[in-house]
Amino acid sequence: MSDEPNKNNTESDKEQAAEEQGVNSTFKAPTAQHKAGFVNIIGRPNVGKSTLMNALVGERLAIITSKAQTTRHRIKGIVNGDDFQIVYSDTPGIIEPKYKMQESMMRFVKSTFKDADVMIAMVDIKNPHAEKEILLYADKLKHLQAPLIFLINKIDASDEETVAKKMDSWAKLINADVMLPISALQKINLDVLFEHILKFLPYHPPFYDKDSLTDRPERFFVSEIIREKILLNYKQEIPYSVEIFIESYKEEENIVRIRALILAERASQKPILIGRGGEKLKKVGTQSRKDIEAFIGQKVYLELFVKIRENWRNNDTFLKNVGYH
Ligand SMILES: Nc1nc2c(ncn2[C@@H]2O[C@H](COP(=O)(O)OP(=O)(O)OP(=O)(O)O)[C@@H](O)[C@H]2O)c(=O)[nH]1
Ligand SMILES: [Mg+2]
C-alpha cells in the first residue's frame, strides 16, 4: 500500500466504478433527497471486515474464517432504503504482497481510496500491535477527503475498562471523524455505526438498481463458498495455493448443476485435497453444496474436480481469467 489516497475523489470515479460493474447508469434518483455512496472497509487480515459487512448488509455475502487472508477480492454489499443506498465494499486484508495474486489483492484495497464517500478502517482490540497499525492508517489516510470512521472491533472479547483506556490513547494517534468500539460478531454498536454512515452519506441518486444486493453474479459466491470450505478443511499452505474456477453453471427447472475446478499449485497437493478414498473432497463437496443451496435458494448438484495449474499465483494470464486485475 505505497500509494497515497487519491485526493480527487470525483463523482466520475464512482460512476465509472459502477459502470464497470455493469450498473444501469441511466437509473436516476426517485427524489432529490436521496442519499447514496460508497462505504469502504479496510484493515489488516482477520480484523473482522467481512464479518462487519455481512452484519451491515444482513446477508452472508463474504466468506469468513479464522485464517488470515480469507478475502481476496473487493466485494460489494448493497443496502437499500426508500431514500438511501449504501454500497459497502469489503476488501482483502492489507499486507505486503509477496506474489502477483497478493499484488492484485492490494490493488483492490487501493481502489477503495479513490471512490470512498465514507472510509471505515478497523483494528482488533486484542491486537498487541494495534498502535503501529493505527499510525500506518493515520499516514495512509491523511489526505483522504472522505469522512473516516475508525472502528475498534471485537470488544466482546475484551472488558469495558480496557476498551475505554485504549480508545483514549488510540484517539490521539489518528484524526478520525468518529472512533467507535464495536463487535461485528455480537452486533454491538452497529446501530450507532449505521447512523453515522447515513449522516455522512452524500445526496446522490442510487448507483445500482434499488433491488440489488451485490455487484457480483451468483457463480462468484459459489466459488467463494467452495473456497471457504477449503480454508476450513485443510491446513497450512493448501488453502492459499488453491483457486476455484466454475467451469459450468446450468440452471434447470428444479436444480442448478455446477461443475467446479479446484486448481492447486503443485501435483503433490492433489492427493492431499482428494484425501484417502476421496473422503476429504467429498466432505468439502457436501458442505459446499449445503451452503450454496441455502445461498441461492435452490437444489444444487455439485461436481468438484482437482486440477493442477503450476505456480498460478504468479501467472498474469491465469489471474486475469479468474478475476484478479
Ligand atoms: N470475538 C470476535 N471475533 C470476531 C469479531 N469479528 C470477527 N471476528 C472473528 O475474526 C475472524 C476473522 O473475521 P473476518 O471477518 O474473516 O476478518 P477479515 O478482516 O475479513 O479477514 P481477511 O479477509 O483475512 O482480511 C473470524 O474468526 C471471525 O469470527 C468480533 O466482533 N468479535
Ligand atoms: Mg475478509
Image (cartoon, grey):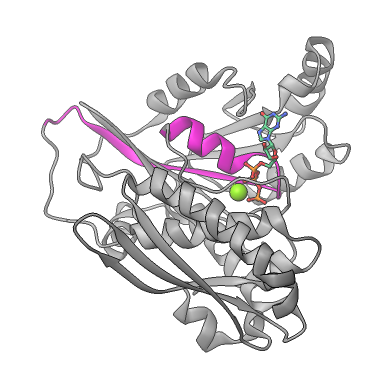
Outermost residue, top side: 161
User: Considering only vertical position in the picture, is 95 above or below 55?
Assistant: below
Ligand 1, image quadrant it occupies: top right
Residue 271 in the figure: left or right of residue 308: right
| Residue under the image location 68 percent in, 63 percent down | 280
Most foreground residue, 261 or 105:
261
Q: Image quadrant for the N terminus?
A: bottom right
| Residue under the image location 77 percent in, 83 percent down | 268
Outermost residue, front side: 277
User: Considering only vertical position in the picture, is 248 above or below 128?
Assistant: below
User: Considering only vertical position in the picture, is 317 above or below 325?
Assistant: below
Residue 318 in the figure: left or right of residue 68: left
Magenta segment: 31-57
List x then y, in percent, for residue 243: 58, 71
Image quadrant of residue 70?
bottom right
Image quadrant of residue 23?
bottom left
Q: Is residue 45 magenta?
A: yes
Residue 260 in the figure: left or right of residue 86: right
Task: Note whether residue 6 is visible.
Answer: no
List x then y, in percent, for residue 257: 34, 65
List x then y, in percent, for residue 195: 43, 19
Residue 248 in the figure: left or right of residue 227: left
Q: Is residue 281 magenta?
A: no
List x then y, in percent, for residue 27: 13, 49
Task: Note whether residue 109 is visible.
Answer: yes
